[in-house]
Image: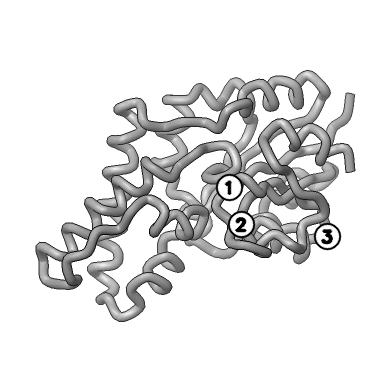
Amino acid sequence: MNDMILLFDFDGTLHNTKHLYGCAFRKGYDMLVAEGFAPEHYYADDDVSKYLGVNAPDMWNSFMPDLPEEMKHKASMRIGEELINGILNGQAVLYDGVTEVLDKLRETGFRLMILSNCRCAYMDAHRKALSLDKYFEDYFCAEEYSFIPKEDIFRHIRSKYPDESFIMIGDRASDIEVGKKNSIPTVGCLYGFAAPHELDGADRLASSPFDILRCVSL
C-alpha cells in the first residue's frame, strides 16, 4: 500500500473526447457564422482536437484572437451546453482499458484525483454519466480558479494535501508544466491529443492507458 496521489488530466488522458468535442465545436462555430462573426467552414474532429485540454480563454485567443470578447464567451457557453447534451445522450467514452487501470491503481493503494482545464458543469456531467466517483476522491476544475494555469492550480492542491506525494498524468504540455514548476514526477500520455514532441519533458511516457501502470512505479 502507498499514500501517493495520482493526479489525472481528463480529456485525452481518461476520456476520448474527440468526437464529442468536434460536434459541440461545430455547433458553436455555426452560431458565429449565423451571427456574422465567422466565415462558413467545416471543422473536422481532427481539426479541433488540438484544442482539447486547453482552457476556454486560451482556446479562443488562439483560434480567433480578434473575435469580440462577448462572442468568445457566448460561443464558449454554446459549446459547453452542447458538450453536456452529448454527455447526457451517452456520447462520453473512456479510452479502452481505463476502468481496469483505475481499479488496479486503487487496489494498489494509490489515491486518485482529477485536475482538468474544464468547466465545473462539464466535469459534474461526466462524474454522473461515467460513475467517476467510484475511482476519484477529489476534482479540481480550472473554472473554479478563474482558468489560471494548471501549475498554479496545483499549488492550491498541495496546500489542501500538504503531506502527500504526487504524480501528474496527462496528454498536454500544460500537464508536464505542473511537474516542472512544482517538482513532481510526470507521465505523458502519447495516445491523447498532444502534438509531436509536446510531451518530451515528461519523466515517463505511456503509450496506452495500461502503460500507466508501469509508469507510476517511478
Q: Earlier in the sequence, mark 3 or mark 2?
A: 2
Kindly report the distance in space between the C-alpha atoms of the residues bearing marks 3 and 2.
17 Å
On the image, the x and y values in percent for residue 14 come to: 58, 37
Q: CA distance from mark 1 to mark 2?
A: 8 Å
Pick out the residue farthest to the bottom: 66
Q: Which residue is mark 1?
A: 192
Name the quarter where the C terminus is drawn: top right
What residue is shown at x 55% (from left), y 64% (from top)?
Answer: 148
Residue that mark 2 sits on: 172
In this view, the residue in front, 171 or 85, is: 171
- The secondary element bearing badge 2 is classed as loop
SS at circle 3: loop
Q: Residue at x 50, y 61 (%)?
A: 147
Q: Which residue is mark 3?
A: 183
Total labels drawn: 3
What's the residue type where badge 3 is placed? Ser
Q: Are marks 1 and 2 in contact (CB under 8 Å)?
A: yes
Q: Residues within 10 Å of mark 1 (few under 14, many from 20)?
A: many
Mark 1 to mark 3 CA distance (whole Å): 23 Å
Q: Which kind of residue does numbered mark 2 sit on?
A: Arg
